[in-house]
């Protein structure tokens, strides 16, 4: 017990000594903290009060602006009605009802509109709800009389008092004066009276009336504000509002929004200038301006924390200073003992081949034995080289590393080990140093270690390292060369994508896989649209840039496991293994969307698209060898359907392609065998129904399928680029038939033949026409692709001029459905315009199409151009077209296309020939 009591007394004495030295500084710090806390709390309350006032002012400004905007927008909507009355003097009930209804539909906030000529309401809308006010004088009540006189005196709208509507809602009267009279006068007519819904005025001002609406109202209820209050959410706290009308300073009414008590307490004010009046808005933060700041508890907690943070370090600091003084004496004694032991150790190591050294981390002093001086090429010194003396012979390249190793040892208290070179008169010497942190008496830390010469070891190591590096370098060069060769063999040099060889290798790998590992394989064959135009117009460098852009798009959009390859020109392949449902469609859509984006090349905006053919092989029985062929077939279909899209290969598609190929071969064979001929559809004058011409239409006398119309073969002929040849065949056949008809005594005044844009742009066209037997006006060319007529093609222009010189008429086919402009008509001056059957067919029951056809006829007449209507299906069509002014009629109402001999028989027996 006695020992325990002694321990307690000793600890108490220590604590007493520890705290005595810090008593006075602690009291001074406490007084300073209390003073600063009082000043800070006072300033915080003032700042909070000012923030509440600023918040209230800003909120009132926003509310006032919104209310003013709402009233002015509704008042502006009524100005049109006042202007109409001012111009006309009065307004019929039906017109008033229509205008008022339209205004109220566009401005739901306007609940009532009335006309009050002479100040007496005569008409009102909605009439059923407000008919009781008809006959009411606007000067009956003081508020109405005051507002109306104010509006009349100022000549603009004036806002009246708040009134209750029949449905129980509230609104505000608006009076707009109307001045009307003869030109030059301005007599007072009366008023346009309207009621604007109170909610429409408040709309957008975020007002909350009462305690039951919204989060802001809930806050009001929690703070004791009763029903009838109006609250708007401020930036930091809800604002209690009240609004009253002060337009008449002598008769300021009660608040119609909020409570009058708001104007009696400390508040901020905002006036709203309205048409013919002024409103005053008062705002008070819920809780008033004298409420306590929200951060009052936080400030108290901060002050307490500051007191602890300041007083505790003061007590600890001054207490420890006393303890430190007592510990210094004991530390000095232990340091002296440590130095003595170190001296004895140095004496023991003097005879060894190692150099011994020590660095005092506190003073930075170094201690070397004679061996250390010898290793560094220095004469033996007094054992304490200068801080920079040892650096004089250290190799400059090794000095930073040597210093870094020592600094890291000191910083992290790790073992010290480093090698560096020393420059001596005989050459370079390599020295290895090993040391460790040692803490001696008085917590004195030193780095103590040994050093020895490793020059020979370093030489042998360097020789081995050089031999190894040489061998590794040669091996790396061989590997790099091999990789480069393999990469170039499998990759496209421009885009860096895989090439055809890589694709074949991938397909071979998939083909040789085990049946159990077989998965679905999809191949996307891509071809860039409009690439050739870019390459031809901007050069191959631009084409290469487009290919690089396309490769980046494909690498970005394709999956990490998909193979992307360029197999030549502007063709690419994407190989996808085990595709998920919808994956190929989504991938194709993304690629097409990205390829559509414009690409900038040296200031030129280049646009191109991509067509994609997709083929999928499924399961172990898939024929991967035909995968590329099938994808190419699908690509052909994608381009055929308009490009910039994707198509999947199917058996039906393959069959269709094979059939198209068969038809293409038969077309070429049919041209050689003369299987193509001309049929004719007659044309009649609209007034006399006399035969005035025929249109030559191509037919194919197919050896197996009989007579085929153009819809069966013309699109394939366009792909074969033989449409111009077919045009020439039809024209020559038509001229031959015309001579046969003439010899038989049948006179056909004119034959029209179709001429394609390709045929019209042929440089040999005029030469092929020279020498043909026809009279001027007897042969007519129908230009069926009017889109090419709006350009400035020199060949087309020259051919048109040559055609006219040969006496061949020009007729624009399908007029009204294409892109032919009026400028083209003025430039070309065709003999006739042919109205397309799409416009002719519906004219019987469609006034719009009738007007359109009449407009085309008027255009032709104004330019001296004849009008031909095709697709005349009934005699009713023929009658109407004749009435509209059409010159020539053609269609099934008269005859379908027939062969030459059938036309000759009909002309001889049925039709009346034009004289």
Image: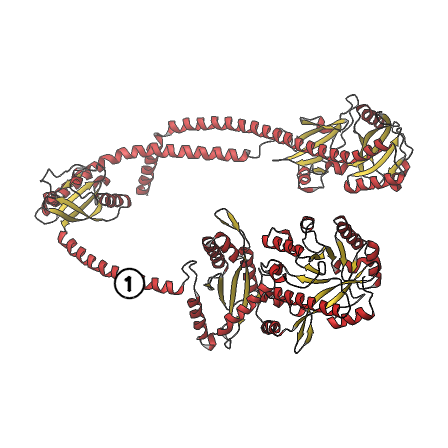
For the residue pair 801 and 95, the one nearer the viewer reads as 801
Q: Is residue 16 visible?
A: no
**Looking at the image, is 110 positioned above or below residue 266?**
below
Extreme right residue here?
A: 135
Where does the image place residue 371, in percent across and percent down from the top left?
10, 45
Quadrant of the rendering where the C terminus is positioned: bottom right
Quadrant of the rendering where the N terminus is positioned: top left
For the residue pair 143 and 655, the one nearer the viewer reads as 655
Where does the image place residue 721, in percent across and percent down from the top left?
58, 65
> Label 1's element?
helix
Q: Is residue 458 visible?
A: yes
**Looking at the image, is 651 positioned above or below residue 78?**
below
User: Residue drawn at (90%, 37%), measured in percent from left and top?
Assistant: 132
Where does the image place residue 477, in percent across and percent down from the top left?
28, 60
Quickly name the residue at label 1. 478
**Residue 127 as seen in the image, left or right of residue 290:** right
The picture quadrant where one finds residue 112 is top right
């Amino acid at each position: 017990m006695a020992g325990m009591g002694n321990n307690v007394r000793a600890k108490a004495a220590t604590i007493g000594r520890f705290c005595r030295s810090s008593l006075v500084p602690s009291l001074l710090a406490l007084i300073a903290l209390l003073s600063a806390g009082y000043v800070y709390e006072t300033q915080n309350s003032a700042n909070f009060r000012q923030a509440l006032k600023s918040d209230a002012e800003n909120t009132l400004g926003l509310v006032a602006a919104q209310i003013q905007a709402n009233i002015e927008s509704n008042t502006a909507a009524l100005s049109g009605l006042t202007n109409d009355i001012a111009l006309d003097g009065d307004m019929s009930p039906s017109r008033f009802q229509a205008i008022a209804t339209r205004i109220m539909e566009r401005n739901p906030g306007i609940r009532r509109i009335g006309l009050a000529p002479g100040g007496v309401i005569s008409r009102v809308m909605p009439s059923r709800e407000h008919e009781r006010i008809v006959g009411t004088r606007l000067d009956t009540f003081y508020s109405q009389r005051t507002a109306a006189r104010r509006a009349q005196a100022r000549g603009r709208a004036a806002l009246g008092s708040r009134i209750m509507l029949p449905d129980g809602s509230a609104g505000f009267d608006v009076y707009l004066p109307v001045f009307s009279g003869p030109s030059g006068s301005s007599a007072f007519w009366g008023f346009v009276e309207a009621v604007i819904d109170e909610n429409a005025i408040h709309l957008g001002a975020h007002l909350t009336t009462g305690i039951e609406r919204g989060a802001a109202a809930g806050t009001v209820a929690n703070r004791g504000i009763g029903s009838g209050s109006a609250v708007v959410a401020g930036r930091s706290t809800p604002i209690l509002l009240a609004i009253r009308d002060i337009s008449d300073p002598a008769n300021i009414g009660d608040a119609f929004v909020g409570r009058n008590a708001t104007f009696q307490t400390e508040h901020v004010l905002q006036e709203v200038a309205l048409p013919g009046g002024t409103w005053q808005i008062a705002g008070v933060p819920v809780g008033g301006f004298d409420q306590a700041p929200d951060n009052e508890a936080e400030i108290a907690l901060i002050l307490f924390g500051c007191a602890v943070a300041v007083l505790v370090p003061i007590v600890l600091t001054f207490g420890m200073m006393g303890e430190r003084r007592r510990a210094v004496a004991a530390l000095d004694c232990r340091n002296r003992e440590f130095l003595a032991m170190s001296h004895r150790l140095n004496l023991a190591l003097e005879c060894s081949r190692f150099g011994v050294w020590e660095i005092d981390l506190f003073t930075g002093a170094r201690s070397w034995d004679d061996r250390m001086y010898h290793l560094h090429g220095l004469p033996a010194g007094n054992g304490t080289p200068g801080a920079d003396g040892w650096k004089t012979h250290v190799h400059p390249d090794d000095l930073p590393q040597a210093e870094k190793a020592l600094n890291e040892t000191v910083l992290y208290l790790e073992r010290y080990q480093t090698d560096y070179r020393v420059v001596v008169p005989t050459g370079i010497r390599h020295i290895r140093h090993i040391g460790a942190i040692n803490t001696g008496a008085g917590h004195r830390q030193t780095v103590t270690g040994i050093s020895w010469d490793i020059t020979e070891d370093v030489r042998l190591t360097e020789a081995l390292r050089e031999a190894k590096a040489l061998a590794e370098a040669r091996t790396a060069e061989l590997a790099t060369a091999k990789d480069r060769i393999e990469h170039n063999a499998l990759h496209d040099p421009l885009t860096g994508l895989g090439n055809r060889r890589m694709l074949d290798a991938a397909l071979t790998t998939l083909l040789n896989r085990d049946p159990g590992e077989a998965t679905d394989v999809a191949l996307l064959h891509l071809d860039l649209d409009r690439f050739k135009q870019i390459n031809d117009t901007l050069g191959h460098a631009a084409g290469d840039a487009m290919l690089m852009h396309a490769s980046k798009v494909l690498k970005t959009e394709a999956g990490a496991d998909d193979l992307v390859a360029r197999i030549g020109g502007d063709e690419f392949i994407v190989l996808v293994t085990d595709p998920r449902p919808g994956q190929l469609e989504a991938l194709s859509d993304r690629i097409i969307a990205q390829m559509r984006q414009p690409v900038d090349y040296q200031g030129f905006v280049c646009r191109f698209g991509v067509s994609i053919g997709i083929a999928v092989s499924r399961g172990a029985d898939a024929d991967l060898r035909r995968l590329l062929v099938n994808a190419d077939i699908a690509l052909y279909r994608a381009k055929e359907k308009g490009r910039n899209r994707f198509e999947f290969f199917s058996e039906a598609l393959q069959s269709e392609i094979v059939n198209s190929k068969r038809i293409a071969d038969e077309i070429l064979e049919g041209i050689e065998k003369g299987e193509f001929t001309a049929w004719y559809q007659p044309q009649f004058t609209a007034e006399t129904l006399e035969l005035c011409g025929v249109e030559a239409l191509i037919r194919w006398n197919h050896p197996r399928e009989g007579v085929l119309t153009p819809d069966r073969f013309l699109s394939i002929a366009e792909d074969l680029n033989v449409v111009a040849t077919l045009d020439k065949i039809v024209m020559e056949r038509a001229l031959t038939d015309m001579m046969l008809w003439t010899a038989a005594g049948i006179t056909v005044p004119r034959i029209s033949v179709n001429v394609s844009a390709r045929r019209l742009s042929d440089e040999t066209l005029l030469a092929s026409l020279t020498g043909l037997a026809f009279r001027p006006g007897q042969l007519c060319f129908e230009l069926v692709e009017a889109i090419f007529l709006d350009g400035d093609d020199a060949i087309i222009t020259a051919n048109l001029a040559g055609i006219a010189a040969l006496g061949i008429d020009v007729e624009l086919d399908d007029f009204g459905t294409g892109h032919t402009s009026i400028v083209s008509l003025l430039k070309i001056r065709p003999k006739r315009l042919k109205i397309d059957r799409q416009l002719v067919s519906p004219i019987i029951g469609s006034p719009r199409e009738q007007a359109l056809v009449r407009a085309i006829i008027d255009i032709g007449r104004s330019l001296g151009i004849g009008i031909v209507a095709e697709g005349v299906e009934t005699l009713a069509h023929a009658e109407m077209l004749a009435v509209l002014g059409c010159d020539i009629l053609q269609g099934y109402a008269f005859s379908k296309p027939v062969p030459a001999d059938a036309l000759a028989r009909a002309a001889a027996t049925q039709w009346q020939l034009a004289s």
